[in-house]
Image (cartoon, rainbow, N blue to C red):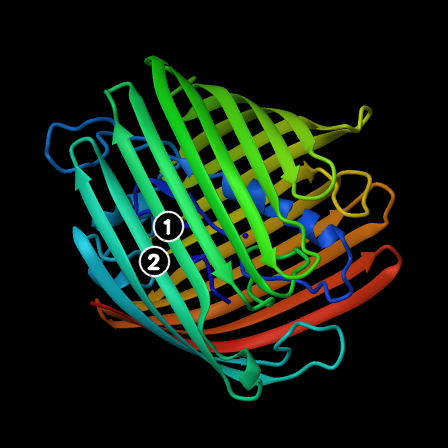
Amino acid sequence: MGQEMRTKGLKSVGHAVETESWTGTGDLRSGVGPGVGMWLLVVWCLFSVTVCFGQEPDTQDFQRVTREFGELSSWQSRQGYDRVPISEKLLLGIPPRREGFTPRLSVTEVYTDNVFLTADRRGTDWITKISPGLNYLLSGGKGQLSADYSVESRIYARNADENTAASRHNGEVFGLWTVSNRTTLTLFDRFESFQDPTEQNVPGLLSTFGRTSINLIALGVKHQMTPSVDFMGSYANFRFSVDRLGAIDSSTHEGEVGVRVRESRRGRITAKYRFRFFDFELGRDLRSHSVLLGQEMDLSETLVVSGTIGAVHVEPNPLTVDVLAQVSIKKSFENAIYELGYMRDAFPPSGGLGQPIVGDFVRASAKVRLVNDVLFDAGLVWILSDTSSNDFTVHTLKWNVGISYAPKPWLMARLGYDMFDQREDILGTSADRLAKKVSLRMTATF
C-alpha cells in the first residue's frame, strides 16, 4: 500500500509474486510513541503476498503449464506477459523480459506544496530525482532468479540541506525453484532505506525523522498432496530501524500454515493459521494468533472475486479478539482493468498504547489504455487506524491520477498528480496534514 505501484511492491517479471502498496506517510515530530507501532501495519501488506507456483515444463524455459487462479486473460495481466504489446510493457511497469542484466535510468521533477508534510508552516519546493537501477534475470526449466537494485539522488531547489547523493536505496531478490512436479519453494527479500518522511510505503503510518531502513525476507513452500489439495507453509521476518535518537527498532517474525482445496475448476477454499511474534528493542515482546478461512472464485476469464474471514487474538491481552476480513473484486476489459479491495487486521500495541491497533483499508485502482502507447491510471486508498479507547485515531486518504506515454519500447514518460491527507487524533493531540504533488518522470531502459 506518487511512486505509484511499481516500486512499492514485488515486480517479478510477470509470473511469480505480486503485491502492491502506496506512497504516503504522516509526521512524528511530537515524538509520540505509537508511531513505531503503526509501522506494523506494513507487515500485513508485505506478508499477504499472492504467490503463484508453476510446475516443471517440458521445455527449457520456465513457464506455467496451466493458468493459475486469478490470472486474468486481459492484456494487462502480468501473467499474460507474452500477449502484452511491446509498446505497453513499460506503461504497466513490466521491465523487459530479458536474460542477464538490464540497466535503466529515471529522472523525475516534482513540485510539492508541503515538502515535509507538516500540519502548519507548509513549505513548497521543486525536487529533482535521479535514479539509476539494474535488473538481473536468470531462468531455466526448474525455476527463476531475479534481482533488482536502485539508488536515488535528490536536489532540492529551496531546501539545499536535504540534498544527498543517496536519498533512497531499494533492493529486491526473488527466487523460485520447482523441486518436483508437486513441490515448489520460493525465496523473497526486499531492502529499503530512505530519508524523506513524505515517501514511505503505506499511508496511515506515522513517519519518523532520520534515515529509515526496512528489510523483509520470506520463505515459502507449496506441496500438492492430492490433485485437488495443496499444503502451504511460509516464514517471514520484517526488520524496521530508524537512525534517530530515541527510535525503537523492531523485528517481526511470522509463520503460516494452511491447506487449499480446489473444489472446482473456478473456485477454491483456503484455511490458514498464522502466528506473529513482535520483538521490540525496548518494551514488551508481543504475540498474535490468527485463523483465516477464504473463498476464491473465478467467475469468468475477466472477473475474479475473493473473500476471507477470520479472527486474531493478541497476547498478552487475554480478552482481546478482533475480526479479520478481506474482500477483493478484479475486473478486466480489452483495454482496461479495475480492482476494488477491503482489508481489516489487528496489530499489537507499542509505545504508550496498551491495546491493539485495528486497521481498515479500502483500495481502488484503474488502468485504461486510451490509445496505443498511452495509458491512464488512477488510484485511491482510505485507511482508518484506531484503538477501542479512541486514544489513537488516524484517518488517511490518498488518491492519484496519471498519464503515461511510451514513444519507444525502451522509453516511458509519466505525468502524475498526487494528493495526500492525514488527520490524526493521538492522546488528545490533533493534526491535519495535507500535501499535493505534481511530477514528471522519464525512464529509459537500456
Q: Is residue 100 above or below residue 320?
A: below
At x 54%, y 85%, the residue is: 160
Quarter of the rendering containing residue 102: bottom left
Task: Return the residue at label 1.
Answer: 172
Residue located at (57% from left, 26% from top): 274
Q: CA distance from mark 2 to mark 1?
A: 6 Å
Question: Which residue: 66% across, 43% down?
Answer: 281
Q: Are marks 2 and 1 in contact (CB under 8 Å)?
A: yes
Q: As shown in the figure, which amino acid type bears the numbered disc 1?
A: Glu
Residue 435 position within the rendered picture, expressed as x and y whole percent measured from the top left: 64, 73
> Hey, which residue is sitting farthest top in the picture?
226
Report x, y in % for residue 262.
41, 19
334 or 440, nearer to the observer: 440
Whether residue 39 sits left or right of residue 272 in the image: it is right
Residue 105 lies, in percent from the top left, at 30, 71
Label 1 neighbour load within 10 Å: few <14, some 14-19, many 20+: many
- At x 59%, y 26%, the residue is 275
Using the image, determine if residue 95 lies above or below residue 157: above
Q: Is residue 347 left or right of residue 409?
A: right
- Of label 2 and label 1, which has the lower sequence position? 2
Mark 2: give few (<14), some (14-19) or many (20+) Cα within 10 Å: some
List the residue tagged with mark 2: 149
